[in-house]
Image (spheres, helix red, strand yellow):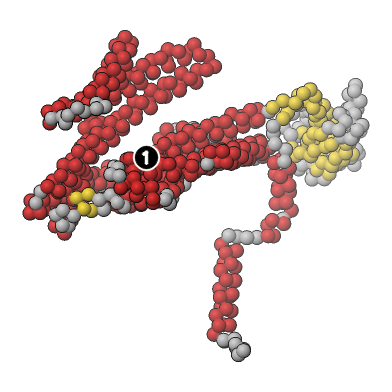
Amino acid sequence: MEKKTASPLRSLGVGLAALATLVIFAYGFEITQIDLQELQSEERQTSLVRVLRALAQPELIEYEQDEQAITSPVYVGCPDDGGVPEAPDTAEASGTYLVINPLCAEPLEAVQVEGFGFFPHSRGPVRFVPGSDPANTVQLGRDVALTDAEGHFVVSIVLPNRPSDEPQFIRATMRRNVGAPRFTQTAKDTWDKIVETVFLALLATTLGTALAIPVSFMAARNLMKGVRSPLASIALSALGWPAGMAAGVLVTGLIGRFSASLATNPLANIAGLVIAPAAVWGLTRWAMPAEETRRPGRGLRYARGAGLLAAVLLGFFTILQLAELTSTISLAIRPALGPFGFLAGFLFQVSDILRISTPVAGALASGGVVGGALGRVGQRLAERGSVTAVKPINVLLSAVAGATILFLAGWAVEWLYEIGRPEYTIWAPLGAGAGLGALLALLTPAKATLPIGLVLYTITRTILNTLRSVEALVMAIVFVIAVGIGPFAGVMALGLHTIVSLAKLYSEQVESILPGPLEAITATGANRLQTIIYAVVPQIVPPYISYTMYRWDINVRMSTIIGFVGGGGIGFLLLQNINLLNYRAASAQMIAIAVVVGAMDYLSSVMREKYV
């Protein structure tokens, strides 16, 4: 075998690569200011040991304490004649006293303090008390003394630079535990905040999961790539959605005002809650009969459509009446519930949720109905019309739709940035949208279908990726401004982050489902909703449960961080104690976080094993 010789160029390249690596890491040390000498300094070592010892003694349990405090005089600066003052008798009746040797010393010199007759095996501070009043509460320095089995200790105290002809004092305070142990106030505060943290994470996960599931279907490429529509259908649907949403907000607002006027009369409120649901049920049964003996005529179909619309409006009225009644009941029963008053508070918040969500639901429902109806009109127009007739209609509708979309986008930019130049933010986008829409219609065959599903998929994915790149900590700062400091801001921040994170995980799981069931259900002529229910959902339930439980675990850990910016939970308490250098209390919060995270991990693993 021929022996290969080393190439000089190859060796040079390896050497240069090694040199470049060395330079990179050396520069990294410089940028990150790595200095092991600082770590080994005596001051840093002393501070580190102090903090580690504090962290190793979490402030969870405390006792009632007996205290012994003995004060003995000392002279800072000896008399000029060289004489040493006589030591006074500081012994108490119990035989507890201090001996200071020498009794006088120059500033910054050390004296030996020896204690007798204190509590055995106790500890406490030995401090210098300035001034001539032994009851002075100002104390300097701090040395910890530990007594032996006979209550004796010896420590050395450095006198401060406070010379005086008058005697000053050294005070030794020894304490011992008595009685049964009890939880400290820190432990109680930690318990309250850790419970708040768990429920904060629970509500955020619930909210995020409920909204992430429908979004995930729009972010799944395999479901959206087959969605295609003619240009006329897309344009009319794009025009119908904003118009329908505006109409929905207007109508639900009118219903809300009418419902609020009835809420002042409890009898009218209760009557509305009885009559309206019955009318909804009757109209729905009539408009959507279980069987049809013959094909209904056009007039009957229109009448049934009007009946369904009336049922939807009455349904919104019922929801708002329920909100008003719930609010009234919660205010009435709160005083009677006593410690269970939070149930009345929950009812009141539910009523607010119903009031706020009803206009949103009405806008989405109305937008979907109007957009879907106009989209079907455009679909029939493209299918039944001739090429020569459809082409100009496509140009007109696309120009109007493009102008509407960019007009709304320009209006949003003007509202957000307050530019004050409508010719640039309103009229220019409107004209550009009309031109682009007309150009798209001219370049597209009259009856061609466009991949509107992939467009929606791309938009949804872009929004999810953009929001997912923003940390929950930043979201918490924004929501703290919106709703104030507290766990509500944390719920909203974690909820939003949960939506975008779970929607991505869910959509990737939808993209990895088996295509066989999807193709089989589609081949039967099922619509989009039926395909999702019967072909997609059965395959994704187990991983969805797993991801949801895992996200709850993540939210528990993240809630400790968003508390640093006022998002509620135990993080706020932890940050407060760290800033106050109260490391024993901070240690209690760290232990609570570790216990909860460990318990959540165990619970999640058990539930995944059982249900997934």
Give the x, y percent position of residue 91. 90, 26
Secondary structure state at the residue bearing disc 1: helix
User: On screen, 174 above or below 221?
Assistant: above
Give the x, y percent position of residue 295. 16, 31
Give the x, y percent position of residue 477. 45, 41
Q: 480 or 542, which lies in front?
A: 542
At x 83% / y 44%, what residue is drawn? 110
Residue 497 quadrant = top left
Name of the residue lying farthest toward the left = 388
- Mark 1 is on which residue type? Ile
User: On screen, 194 above or below 216?
Assistant: above
Residue 101 visible in the current orientation: yes
At x 80% / y 41%, what residue is drawn? 159
Q: 597 or 101, which lies in front?
A: 597
Say left or right for 26 vs 421: right
Say left or right for 447 vs 573: left
Residue 435 quadrant = bottom left
Residue 339 quadrant = top right
